[in-house]
Image (cartoon, grey):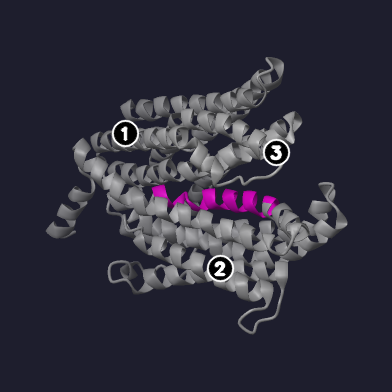
Amino acid sequence: MSVQATARQRRQTPTTLRGEVRATGSLAFPLAITNLAQMALGATDVIMVGWLGPEKLAAAALAANLFFPLYQFGLGVASATAPIISQALGGRRFRHVRRTVRQGLWVCVLLAVPMSVLLYNGEAVILLLGQTPMSAELGGEYLRVLLWGLLPALWFVVLRSFLVSHQRPRAATVITIIAVALNVLANYGLMFGNFGLPRLELVGAAIATVIVDVFMFAALLGFVIYDRRLRRYHVLVRIWRSDWPLFRDILRIGVPIGLTILAEMGLFAVSVFLMGLIGTTEVAAHAIATTCAGITFMIPLAIGHAATVRVGWAVGAGNYDAARVCGQAAFGLGMVCAVISALTLWLADELIISAFLRDAAGATATAAAAIVFLHFAALFQLFDATQAVMAGALRGLKDTTVPMLIANAGYWGVGLGSAVLLGFGVGLAGPGIWIGLALGLGTVGLLLTVRFWRLLRRAGIGTVAAT
């Protein structure tokens, strides 16, 4: 490698805390924008499908509840390419980078085939869940089109991981922002028959989503192929060539990531049903608070993704002191952002609630409950940020199996157990459920933090982290 390239690598792995905070922050900021833009994609779909009427919205919601967990699991598996590529770049093993991208694309194919079969039979699945034949039929039609966007969406994750590992996330950010506008236009045309297009309603919404998924992947692939610094990898050359050890490595690292994501999603999904046992007012208030918490979570999630890359670079270069500094910087940034989010949710509670509720029957009671829940959401910002950031840092070490076990024990054991106990056994109702959520997140965050520092102190960190 040239002297200039070596100097560039040193700049990309600073050993001072201030330099690392700056590097992590500059990487995390566009990632946070990307995360928020992806949330906007889902939000525009919900809003515009709602214009079709409650029956279509209910069918789309049922279909989304089947599609989204599958996609999130696949996203977790595909994102395993980020720590592998980051460590390869840190160790200047550039051929390994190219092979990882190729095998990541094939892993996505492996995942998409059985998922697509399940989605194709979505109508039967929705019926098995006890829903009405009308909702099942509409949801099934929606899923049979939507499944065609699954593979391009997963391929986009692999290419985004490739770019982020090079610490160049802006192209993915710009493409995602453009995709939001494209999604609105495609929905407007295909759902409602505008721009001379046929009125396809719910099927039109699904076609629009597929168009957006294909666009995002194609646009990012075009950038990777034609960018002066990235095209040297020739990621599509001999795409058929197998590398089974690396293929298995992606699955070994990625499947626990996917299961960890599902564990956290499952906890919050079950919390909705627990709130439903208390009353509809609590369910509505809970939805408002969790929506706000979901938005603020995009920031520590982005910092966690940045930590994966930064720690991966340091470990790949064999610089464990730098890896420790990377963890410290990411943790510090996460705590600062969490405090800001907490103060915002606490001090601007009434303003935030007013954005969700208008004058209507039951709005006053819902607003009062939502303010209470929003305060609890503010208090657990530190816990949520800790688990997100430290999970990302551990992925930089390629350590995902033990964090998955920690997440499942923390979320489903401590979190759900204490939510049920405090909400119904002690009689705290909704606040008790939120305290349980906070305890689950706090437990996971603490244990992940301890594990990160423990792994860094061990000799032979590369071997230990892979266990």
User: What residue is pinned by disc 2?
Assistant: 184
Q: Is residue 239 above or below residue 268?
A: below
Q: Is residue 216 magenta?
A: no
Secondary element at tag 2: helix
Task: Give how far across and how far down residue 297 sits, in percent.
Answer: 47, 41
For badge 3, the amino acid type reads Gly
| Callout 1: SS | helix
Horizontal arrangement in the rendering, residue 193 relative to residue 38 (left or right): right
- The answer to whether marks 2 and 1 mark residues whose Cβ atoms lie closer than 8 Å is no
Question: Residue 34 appears at what percent x and percent y?
Answer: 43, 56
Q: Residue furthest front?
A: 359
For disc 3, the neighbor class at 10 Å (few under 14, some 14 to 19, many from 20) is few
Viewer-side residue, 96 vs 323: 323
The correct choice, above or below, for 142 with respect to 245 in the image is below
Q: CA separation, marks 3 and 1? A: 41 Å
**Image disc number at residue 332:** 1
List x then y, in percent, for residue 243: 48, 58
Residue occupying image coordinates x 46% and y 52% = 35
- Horizontally, residue 316 falls left or right of residue 212, namely left
Residue 121: name its quadrant.
bottom right
Residue topped by disc 3: 362
- Precedes in sequence: disc 2 or disc 1: 2
Q: Is residue 434 above or below residue 396?
A: above
Residue extending furthest toward the right? 133
Query: What range of the chain is rendered magenta?
Result: 65-83
The disc, 2 or 3, on the residue closer to the chain's N-terminal end is 2
Residue that lies at the very extreme toward the left in this rendered image: 3
Q: Amino acid at mark 2?
A: Val
